[in-house]
Structure formats: structure tokens, C-alpha cells
């Protein structure tokens, strides 16, 4: 029971840690790209769902390829952590991009 709780704590901290790293990357991306990439859409904010899901799938594929080649995996090579990192980026950009026009 205690080992399970410790493992769950480590997983949760890693998940939120990747989200914070993603937010930092999203903040840095505002320097060269201060405006939203897509403007005037009725689907404003959909990137908060689509981008993390696509990134999670992409990182799962990277992990699968690395596993097939016998290469060591990192946490980011899995769907949840790829999703978490991309969610941090998307959320930071959503909240902080300058709305043009």
C-alpha cells in the first residue's frame, strides 16, 4: 500500500512537472511568436484539446519506435507525459498570446 502511494505521488509529480516545463516552453515561444497562430475562429480554444492529444499520440509512437529498437525510454515517450507537456504549452499560449485584430 505504501509503495503504491509513493509510486502514485512520483507519477503525479512527474505529470505536473512536465506540464510546468511545457508552460515554460510555451512562454518562451511567445518571444518569437507573440500572436495566436489562428485568428477569428468559432472554435477558439480547441487547441487546448487537439494539440495535447496529437502530441501524446506522437510521443507514444516515438516511444514505440524506441522500444522496438531497444533504446532506453524516458517518461516523455508516453502518451500521458507528452499530453501533459503539450497541454502546458497550449495553455500558456492560449492565456498569453496577443489577440490581433
Image: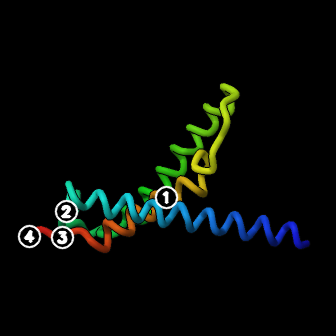
Callouts 3 and 2 close, C-beta under 8 Å? yes
Marks 2 and 1, Cα distance to the nearest angstrom? Answer: 20 Å
Q: Secondary structure at mark 1?
A: helix
Q: Which residue is mark 3?
A: 98
Residues marked 2 and 1 touching at CB (< 8 Å)? no
In which quadrant will I find the N terminus?
Answer: bottom right
Is residue 24 rendered to the left or right of residue 6?
left
- The residues bearing labels 3 and 2 have C-alpha atoms spaced at a distance of 6 Å
Image location (x, y in percent) of residue 29? 29, 57
Quickly name the residue at label 2. 34
Residue 59 in which image quadrant: top right
Q: CA distance from mark 4 to mark 2?
A: 13 Å
Furthest residue to the right?
1
- Residue carrying label 4: 101
Taking the image as shown, residue 72 lies to the left or right of residue 100, namely right
User: Is 94 left or right of 35, judged from the image as shown?
Assistant: right
Q: CA distance from mark 3 to mark 4?
A: 9 Å
| Residue located at (47% from left, 61% from top) | 21
Inter-mark Cα distance, 4 to 1: 29 Å
Q: Earlier in the sequence, mark 2 or mark 1?
A: 2
Q: Are marks 4 and 1 in contact (CB under 8 Å)?
A: no
Q: Which residue is mark 1?
A: 85
In this rendering, position of residue 64 left or right of residue 46: right
Amino acid at each position: 500500500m505504501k509503495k503504491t502511494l509513493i509510486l502514485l505521488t512520483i507519477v503525479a509529480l512527474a505529470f505536473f512537472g512536465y506540464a510546468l516545463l511545457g508552460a515554460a516552453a510555451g512562454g518562451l515561444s511567445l518571444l518569437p511568436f507573440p500572436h495566436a497562430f489562428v485568428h477569428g475562429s468559432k472554435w477558439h480554444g480547441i487547441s487546448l484539446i487537439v494539440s495535447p492529444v496529437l502530441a501524446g499520440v506522437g510521443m507514444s509512437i516515438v516511444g514505440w519506435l524506441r522500444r522496438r529498437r531497444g533504446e532506453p525510454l524516458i517518461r516523455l515517450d508516453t502518451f500521458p507525459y507528452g499530453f501533459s507537456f503539450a497541454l502546458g504549452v497550449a495553455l500558456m499560449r492560449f492565456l498569453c498570446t496577443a489577440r490581433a485584430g
